[in-house]
Image: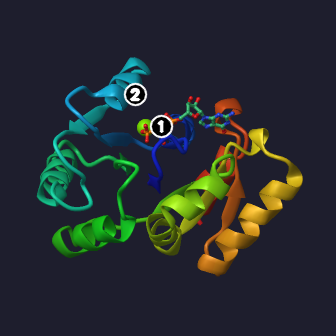
Amino acid sequence: MAGFLGSGKTTVLLELARRVAEASLTLAIVENEIGEVGVDGGIVRERGLPVRELFGGCVCCTLQTGLVDTLRALAADPAPDWVLVEPTGLAAPADITTTVRELMPDVDEIRALTLVDAERWETLAHIVEPLITAQIEAADVIAITKVDLVSDDALAQVTAAVRLVNTSAPIVPVAATAGAGVQGIFESLIA
Ligand SMILES: Nc1nc2c(ncn2[C@@H]2O[C@H](COP(=O)(O)OP(=O)(O)OP(=O)(O)O)[C@@H](O)[C@H]2O)c(=O)[nH]1
Ligand SMILES: [Mg+2]
């Protein structure tokens, strides 16, 4: 799962976790925390979900071996059907999927879900364009989040801009605080 800081990753992750459980699939969550305190890990744990936290860097670069070690430990525990990984908002998902693919050949499927913040698209697409572009390019599924906060025109503009960068991934509009659209993400991920 990728998406800039504050784009809605934890919110979507919790909603996705519910759907995974409803489908009678087992799940583990890995949170890559910024700083010393496990903010998102705490939120996930409060919901009664199993979570492991990785501190002190980003799983897309300095913590790649930490992520693989954590995934190996999960796989032995016994292996869950799904592992949802929330990296930091600065992560490039291609680096993560390449590493896991190379070092963990037993993992059946790896899907990159990228979140694009509709409300802050104009701002972020300018300020951090290379990062946002890399996140969208690497995505197997793209969720445009916070659509409840923008007009239909603005949503159409973001969708068109995202489609130019990634011509094939499904694009799902989402208002995750209300749970809307998350079923579409789940279905696209398992398709
Ligand atoms: N209105 C609205 N707010 C949302 C939506 N999704 C997330 N938010 C809000 O956006 C803020 C950030 O959401 P998070 O889920 O914490 O985002 P994140 O990407 O995990 O953030 P970091 O882990 O800090 O990078 C929170 O205040 C959420 O309640 C949405 O679909 N609609
Ligand atoms: Mg988060």
Placement of the C terminus among the 4 image quadrants: bottom right
Q: Inspect the image, locate mark 1, and give the three-letter code of the amino acid beneath it.
A: Thr
Going by the image, does 172 lie left or right of 47? right
Rendering coords of residue 179 (x, y %): 68, 35
Q: Secondary structure at mark 2?
A: helix
Going by the image, does 123 lie left or right of 49? right
Mark 1 Cβ and ligand 2 under 8 Å apart: yes
Rendering coords of residue 64 (x, y %): 18, 59
Going by the image, does 125 lie left or right of 62? right
Q: CA distance from mark 1 to mark 2?
A: 8 Å
Q: Is residue 95 above or below residue 149?
A: below
Q: For the image shown, how many numbered marks are present on the structure?
A: 2
- In front: 23, or 43? 43
Rendering coords of residue 15 (x, y %): 57, 36
Q: Is residue 179 above or below residue 86?
A: above
Residue holding disc 2: 44
The residue lying at 34 percent from left, 23 percent from top is: 42
Ligand 2, image quadrant it occupies: top left
Contact flag, marks 1 and 2 (Cβ < 8 Å): yes
Residue holding disc 1: 10
Closer to the chain start, of discs 1 and 2, is: 1
The residue lying at 50 percent from left, 40 percent from top is: 6
